[in-house]
Structure formats: C-alpha cells, structure tokens
Image (cartoon, rainbow, N blue to C red):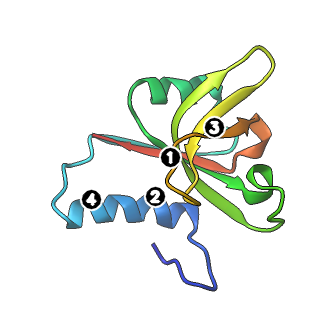
C-alpha cells in the first residue's frame, strides 16, 4: 500500500491495496466495492452500507479526530453509528488500540474519502 515511515498511505493506494491483498492471498472474492470522494456520499449512504454489513474505511484530517495531532490524515474502520437529533457519530476502530468503542463526530465537511469492499 506504499506506506513508509516518511510517507503515509494515500487513500487510492489503500483501496487498491486491500483488493490486491484479498486476491493474491486466496481470500473470498470481493462481490462489490465503492470508493467516494467528498461530495459523493452522505449520512444516509454511510448508514445504509453499515446496515448492509459493509465495513467501511474513512479518511479524515487527524485533527478532526485527535486535536493533539495537528497535521496529517488518518484512516479508520467504521463498525457502527449512533444518530442523535443534532449530532451523528460513527463508531470506529481507529488503529491506535484494539477497542471498537471509539466515536467520531461525523460532519459532512470533515471526511476526505470513504470506501468499502463487500463479500
């Protein structure tokens, strides 16, 4: 996926890298996938995919998730959501630890890309 200690993984490399890993390791073939840049998805699209069992990967500016880190972006796996009257939250695995109980305050403006593969 072209990651190094001096260069992070680009979203398109991550998306194609996951598909390549699946096919080259004899894992179950992907039945479908989708990749969307900002302005091509909304809350309804995200929740529909989560409800359909499609674990989704989201790329956000890291400062939107962890205000102590000022530069860069961060991938997270969406594993669920909670919708409230005024605020929507994505339940995420953030990669900083093994917990599935982290929440990201979703706003239409704070997501760079989102993608999924389904089986």
Compared to residue 47, the image places residue 75 above or below, namely below
Question: Looking at the image, is mark 3 or mark 1 earlier in the sequence?
Answer: 3
Question: How far apart are labels 3 and 4 at the CA level?
Answer: 26 Å
Residue that appears at 49% across and 54% down: 98
Q: Circles 2 and 1: CB distance less than 8 Å?
A: yes
Q: Which residue is mark 3?
A: 40
Label located before the other in sequence (3 or 2): 2
Q: Residue at x 83, y 56 (%)?
A: 67
Q: Which mark's residue is nearer the viewer, 3 or 1?
A: 1
Residue 80, position as x, y percentages in the image:
52, 31
- Label number found at residue 22: 4
Q: Element at badge 2? A: helix
Helix, strand or loop at disc 3? loop
Tag 2 residue: 15
Q: Which residue occupies 64% across, 27% down?
A: 43
Q: Earlier in the sequence, mark 3 or mark 4?
A: 4
Q: Marks 4 and 3: in contact by CB < 8 Å?
A: no
Quadrant into which the N terminus falls: bottom left
* Disc with the residue nearer the chain's start (2 vs 4): 2
Residue at horizontal 76 percent and vertical 35 percent from the top: 107
Q: Are marks 1 and 4 in contact (CB under 8 Å)?
A: no
**Snapshot quadrant of residue 44:** top right
């Amino acid at each position: 996926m072209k990651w190094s200690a001096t260069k992070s993984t680009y979203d398109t490399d991550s998306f194609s890298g996951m598909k390549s890993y699946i096919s080259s390791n004899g894992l179950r073939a992907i039945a479908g996938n989708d990749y969307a840049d900002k302005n091509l998805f909304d809350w309804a699209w995200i929740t529909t995919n989560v409800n359909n069992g499609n674990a989704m990967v989201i790329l956000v500016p890291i400062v939107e998730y962890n205000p102590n880190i000022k530069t860069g972006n961060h991938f997270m796996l969406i594993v669920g959501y909670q919708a409230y009257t005024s605020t929507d939250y994505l339940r995420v695995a953030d990669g900083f630890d093994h917990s599935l109980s982290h929440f990201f305050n979703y706003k239409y403006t704070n997501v760079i890309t989102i993608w999924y593969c389904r089986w």
